[in-house]
Amino acid sequence: GINAEYGESSRNGSFKQRFSRPRFLFIPTVQPRFRPSFMIYYIIGAVLFALLGFAIYIQIDRKNSRERKEKRNPPEERAYRSKSEENIARCETEALSLLLQKKQDSLQNNEAVDDLSDGYVNGAKLEHLLVPKDEQGFLVTFSPDQEEEYFQFFKQFGMVVIQILSDEECEKSQEEVWNFLERCHPHLKKDDPSTWETTWPIYSHVSVSGDTPILSPQMFLNRQNPNIHRIFSVLYGTPKLWVSVDRANLARPTRKVPLKVSASEWKLVDKEEWRSVGHESLHWEINPWSGKTLLSGFIPGDLSANKGFERWKLLGFLALQDCASDDGVYYGVPGFHHFFKTWAQSNKHLAASELGSSVPFQVPQDDPIRRECQKFPVRRGCLLILHPAIPYGSCPNDSSRGRMMQYLRMVPQNDISVAPLMQREWLPQSDGFSLTELGEKLLGLKPWVD
């Protein structure tokens, strides 16, 4: 028995020696059988149990999130929205294909044109004009009703700013530009600037969204905005106009950009490499000697008619966000349209250079007119219109805010050098969207009649 075995200490060694090798679960003051390696197994088990609990929590949270999303966006609405986005993307691709085809055709038929700058009035001097600004540093802004005031302002400065869009229209326009970017670049996410590094559109060095026209509903509502048509009609002297179907201009913020460094951690980083080329971009969209003009947003019409200086094609930029002085705003030389002919006559030697016939035409880096440049800060919802003889460019963005604009210009319907880009099947198939009669005519889908 147990007691008998323990009593045999004289034959099988001392009691201490016997007790140091126990055979039973009850171990009072002896060396334990538990080994340190077992502790590792207990820790691993606890960690796995915690991970399992965390995984269950994540699944429950995702389920609740899906249910909340289902309530906000029913499956039928999401399916319709997805189909609508898919249709818009298809139409944008078709529009880009047509643009590239027409551009290639124009290059193949790009015969040299005569120098038409002879006869310019020489001797005019560039007058330094300081564009007036408001108390917040934005360019002075007119309303669409101030026709005589902004007409005279434009004649003097070759540029003007008019308030057009409401805050709601600006928000919808911004959302559609971001949707466009995410359609074209699936890995790019609006709310995660970390994805803006390698998936940002081409031409980011000049803050352009690419070559593809944006064909979403609010973009078309902006194009058919009656106040925009009214302003261009005043400046051109005719209501019979065509509107461009064009791209967006946007710049990433470069200061204190919130970049994700882990699942729950963000870090504010300066991104100098996201800055645009800035001062190097000063250019004209018209050739100073031939009068050949860049036809963005339209397709070429009669190529032989794209020359001379009898028909000016005004430029338009619709600000979808506040564009303050540090936000990568446009800059240029106000009033230069008065001096443009004299400059061309004084620099005729450049017309014979390799780049003399190019459009757009870059202002030489050593040209003194660069010292006359001023920034053009504009508020959100404002339309900035420039005379094509005003040299302009975009400043590098040096702030924590982005810049976003919609290219929007109009030309007279009787300008045979251009033709409307739009096709009816490209119109958005969205509830609540429809073209007005004015929109139909501006897009060339209905003729202008006397």
Image (tube, rainbow, N blue to C red):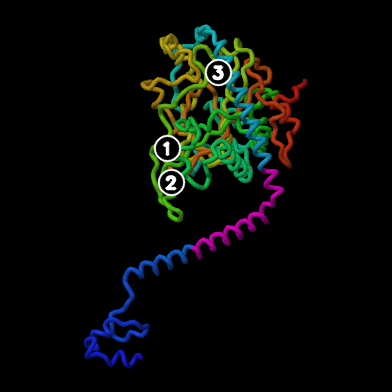
Q: Earlier in the sequence, mark 1 or mark 2?
A: 2
Which mark's residue is nearer the viewer, 3 or 2? 2
Q: Earlier in the sequence, mark 3 or mark 1?
A: 1
Toward the right, the furthest residue is 450
Query: Disc 2 on helix, strand or loop?
Result: strand
Toward the front, the furthest residue is 11
Compared across the picture, whether 34 is left or right of 121 comes to left
Residue of label 3: 293
Give the alpha-carbon distance from disc 1 to disc 2, as whole Å: 11 Å
Marks 1,2: beta carbons within 8 A = yes
* Label 3 crowd bin: few (<14), some (14–19), many (20+), radius 10 Å: many
Residue of label 1: 274
Residue of label 2: 257
Q: Residue at x 57, y 18 (%)?
A: 103
The rendered magenta stretch, by its main secondary structure, is classed as helix
The quadrant of the image that shows the C terminus is top right
Give the alpha-carbon distance from disc 3 to disc 1, as whole Å: 29 Å
Residue 23 shows up from this direction: yes
Inspect the image, locate mark 2, and give the three-letter code of the amino acid beneath it.
Val
Above or below residue 309? Residue 385 is: below
Query: Disc 3 on helix, strand or loop?
Result: loop
Compared across the picture, whether 103 is left or right of 193 comes to right
Numbered range of the magenta stretch: 52-81
Residue 445, given in percent of the width and then of the height, sits at 73, 25
Residue 408, given in percent of the width and then of the height, sits at 60, 30
